[in-house]
Image (cartoon, rainbow, N blue to C red):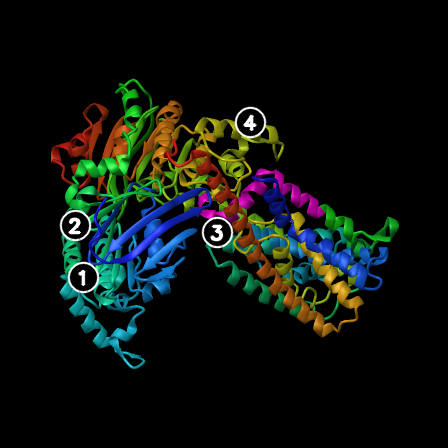
Amino acid sequence: MSKKTRVQMFLLDNLIWLIVIGFFLLNAIITPHFATYNNIVNIFYHSSIMSMLILGQGLILIIGRLDLSIESTLAFAPGVAMLLVTQWLPGGAGPVSAIILTLAVGALVGLFNGYCIGKIGVNPFLQTLSMLIMLRGLVLFLVPFSIFPLHDVYTYAGKARIFGNIPVAIPITIAIFIIFHFVIQYTPFGRFFMATGGNPKASFISGINTTRIVMYAFMLSGLLAAVAGLLYAGRQGSVNNSMGDGMVLLAFAGAILGGASLEGGKGTPMGMLGGGILLGMISNSLNLLGVGVTLVYATKGALIFVAIVLDRIKVKLRNHLMQKEQLEKILHQSKGDGESFSPSS
Amino acid sequence: MWEKKGKIVLGLYGISKVYPGTVALHDVNLEIEKGVVHGIIGKNGAGKTTLVGIIAGIISPTKGEIVIEDRHYTHLSCIKARQENISIVPQEPQLMLDLSVAENLFIPNYHLASKGRRIHWDEMYIKAENILKQAGLGLNSRAQAGELSISDRQLVLVVKACYVEQARIIILDEVSASLTQKDEKLLYRIIEERKREGKTILFISHRTDELLEICDRVTVLRDGRSVTTVSCDTLNMEKLSSLIVGEEFRFQRICNEIAACDQREKETVLEVQNLTKLGAFQNISFTLKDKEVLGIAGLRGSGRTEIFRSIMGIEPLDEGLIKLKGKKVRFASPADALKKGLAFLPEDRESEGIISSLSVRENLVLSALKKITRIFCIHKQTEKDMITHLIHSLDIKISSAEQEVSQLSGGNKQKVVVGRIVANQPRVYILDEPTRGIDIAAKESVLKIIREQLSQTGGIILTSPGLEDLLLVCDRILVLYRGRLVAEMRRENFSETTLFNAVQGGTEPNQVAGVASN
């Protein structure tokens, strides 16, 4: 492979970070107060919740499925956990148990999705659509009014700030991304994820327990949705029934911008982090520029469109590059052979 | 080579088609005269299907020019080809299985059987009935296409191209491969009749006898190049065969190296008894010795693939016993089978073998990740050593291990899948058509790997699309006919004709008894 093609391929594979950098530089010039320390911290802080959802969605996209229910899980997990510790459990429980319960509820919801999809064979779209509606309905029923105040320990992840006035949510998010990046790239478990998404039949035949991988993926996505819920509840200091409403489609957009593909088998957690940051920067700059709330929503819609088109263009460009490379190699070869062609031997 | 007589209806000039990893066609020239049955012949992977795909507008060429009468094209689309009155009957019959035979015939040309915009169903059925009668097919036009046999489905498509679409140029892509002998005769009659009406027919096949019988002229493709076009009167079978192969048949070399060896001394690794899956196979019993190469010969649909899939635990068995080194086993999934030392190479490489979005490296080590993992992580150096060894020993041609598998040629893709199996060091290899759809050099190399490397480490069961491959590498061949084992042959008394007859179902009953007592 020539050096030029290799560079082009590298840029295509890391397209999202190029866009992030480009968008940042553009806004640093045209948007007032954009490139300030406080605002940058602010962008990261506000992207953290969405990034968790994007990572969850991204893991599911890697195995070639999709999960609509994460935004409801985001509200359901902290809602049920708070009700358990404050009302349902006899004697109540501490804030640490509340955190563990939140995560457990999220993971269980995901596991249930994974079981139905992997073992029973329910279509993932229909399964998670029903969960999306059902869990939101349950949250509306169970948490008619906001639950507050929350314990300081419970809100620590979402609200507290450490050295340099940095919200704790930022290091937590980055740590989670690093862990997942490592797992996906360097462990057999991660390889199984990529393989299952790339070709489930071939993976099954080559000895991967694809059912179990599907269940794990959905469980992890539920768990990450619960982490997002924890950050959300912590930031606003309460649990209410509209948390996460409408976030799932943006999570799709972010994951696809970050290199995942609806066909599965593609994407890395680090790319998805880029997708999350880009979404955060777009909201932030539109706010700073004084664009109205309704128009912000339309812009986000346009963004989903761009994400999908970008995915296609990227695949096409990549194939085109490969084909060109091949053609050059072949032309080069037949030049060497001269006029007489001998069958490959 | 031949003198131009008639008018050229179709000319291809300098056509090339490059796929990632392979050159399917290289500078192919072809001229086809009006009213002629023109044969195209070549080995597997010679580019026959790509060439007709280009004519039918399914594939667009990388380079070259297509001339239809006086109109010049750089590429055709399916719609353009249809407007030019070109019809193609593809290799695998593709009907809409839920629709009736009549509707399949008229789709999408409903206007042929309708008044105004409304479809007249009754009229369509009557018309279809007449057309089928004219062609000599005794099919009910109201029958569902899904209920027809493969052979009948193929004929329906031929009838559609010849009688309904009234195409000027009809392309028949290895149509006879899925026909029964009786239907073959019918096909030849239809071709003869169309020719008399002045239609041009492009007939693709890899059977020399058939081509010589029905074609006026033959173009030979070899390694994606048009070698020559000759008139059939000047040809005989041997001459045509040597044109197709182009050089001495190289497999002879492998063959000579194998001495018939005594199987009795070796230990039995796999034994199956009375395997039954209703509707697929019945009472299959055989044993596999260590370091033995056992071939299973049978027609498409005779149950080969199903037996393999059932042993591996991909599809459930209805009945039967599987013994691995004397121990009774039953696998719940391929993962389970793999753990106990059985490896499976699936027949369909593209959809069940390779994982095309991953790199060569990731594909190769996929089944053997446990061996290279240290404390939850993949050990980079061990992984590297493993793939270097595999690439070297299987002679996989790649530019780097990080290359995506989708870019490789068919033969190299197959070697990657073989490599994945080898990496796990199984005791039993179950290979379903390892030589399917790969070019002759790759085929030779894969067969060599099977014979010289795999058979040193375990027992092998394999099937093949062509009997000659089995005759070359196997120690023993079992013949499967309609889901039953009907004959067994040992290396000492291999004979192509007996094997061919047995595969077609023409065996004496006493040979069956021979297998049962074995």
Foreground pick, A29 / A87: A29
**Residue at the image point whose x is 56% and y is 41% from the top:** A191
Q: Name the residue carrying label 4.
A: B385
* Element class at badge 4: helix
Residue B292 position by quadrant: top left
- Give the quadrant of the N terminus of chain B: top left
Identify the subunit bearing mark 3. Answer: A
Residue A157 relative to residue A63: left or right:
right
Q: CA distance from mark 2 to mark 4?
A: 55 Å
Residue A320 lies, in percent from the top left, at 52, 51
Which kind of residue does numbered mark 4 sit on?
Asp
Picture disc at residue A119? 3
Q: CA distance from mark 4 to mark 1?
A: 64 Å
* Element class at badge 3: helix
Residue B113 relative to residue A330: left or right:
left
Q: Is residue A192 magenta?
A: yes
Residue A82 relative to residue B146: left or right:
right
Q: Name the residue carrying label 2.
A: B214
Magenta span covers which residues? Answer: A176-203
Which of the two marks, 4 or 1, is nearer to us in this view?
1
